[in-house]
Amino acid sequence: MSSLKETYWDPIAGFGVTFRTMFRKVVTEQYPFDKQPTAPRFHGRHQLNRWPDGLEKCIGCELCAWACPADAIYVEGASNTDDERFSPGERYGRVYQINYLRCILCGLCIEACPTRALTMTNEYELADDNRADLIYEKSDLLAPLLPGMEQPPHPMRLGDDEGAYYRGENQGENS
């Protein structure tokens, strides 16, 4: 008896939800023209950060790639030389790629980064009509040069060695 009652009542209850919402005011999002701000802690596109003199914070350790559960990050480290210095340490990320076709924007790579070189921005428009354009290279991910920064490669400007560089010592002396 109860199954027969449920058989007839369930579709009517479903239509009740439809009829209740059918006469409400329509909410239209004007998305492409009126973009709403994201939450401050929103996880969007990644960014490779720089030191105040323009050197890259990435040391090519590949910890972000190891932490990525979706295997979306590829890092190839290389050694700095005295003639070509891209980061204050002995290594830098020569090749850095993030495949946004695979990335799930979980932020585990951010937690794994020992130098805070990798952070996430609030940029969320990552759609494209070409699959190859969704593999971001190092040049796409690097933070822009701010006033006072110099395009690498160049010598360290903020300290005598990488230890002083990372601790923030001697920042006013060598600028």
Image: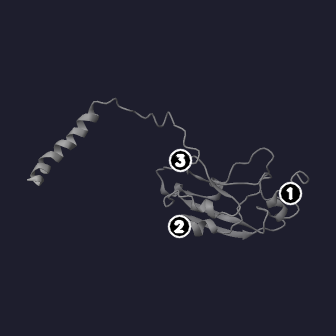
> Which secondary structure lies at badge 2?
loop
Q: Nearer the viewer, residue 86 or 45?
A: 45
Sequence order check, earlier mark of 1 and 3:
3
First-in-chain label (2 vs 3):
2
Kindly identify the amino acid type of the residue bearing the numbered disc 1.
Glu
**Residue at horizontal 86 percent and vertical 53 percent from the top:** 171
**Marks 1/2: CA distance?**
36 Å
Q: Residue 124 carries which label?
A: 3
Secondary element under disc 1, as helix, strand or loop, is: loop
Please state if 125 lies on the left or on the right of 157 as rendered: left
Element under disc 3: loop
Whichever of callouts 1 and 2 sits on the residue coming sooner in the sequence is 2
In the shown orientation, is residue 14 left or right of residue 58?
Answer: left
For disc 1, the marked residue is 169
**In contact (CB < 8 Å): disc 2 and disc 3:** no
Cβ atoms at labels 1 and 2 below 8 Å apart: no
Of labels 1 and 2, the one closer to you? 1
Q: In this view, does 15 lie to the left or right of 147?
A: left
The residue that disc 2 covers is: 71
In the picture, residue 56 is in which quadrant? bottom right
Q: Distance between the residues labelled 1 and 3?
A: 36 Å
Image quadrant where residue 118 sits = bottom right
Q: Do the residues labelled 1 and 3 touch (CB within 8 Å)?
A: no
Amino acid residing under circle 3: Tyr
Q: Looking at the picture, how far across and down is residue 98, in whole percent? A: 57, 60
Q: Where is residue 34 in the image (x, y as percent from the top left)?
A: 50, 33
Picture coordinates of residue 80, whole percent (x, y): 78, 67
Q: Residues within 10 Å of mark 1 (few under 14, many from 20)?
A: some
Residue flagged by tag 2: what amino acid is it? Answer: Asp
Q: Is residue 52 left or right of residue 100?
A: right
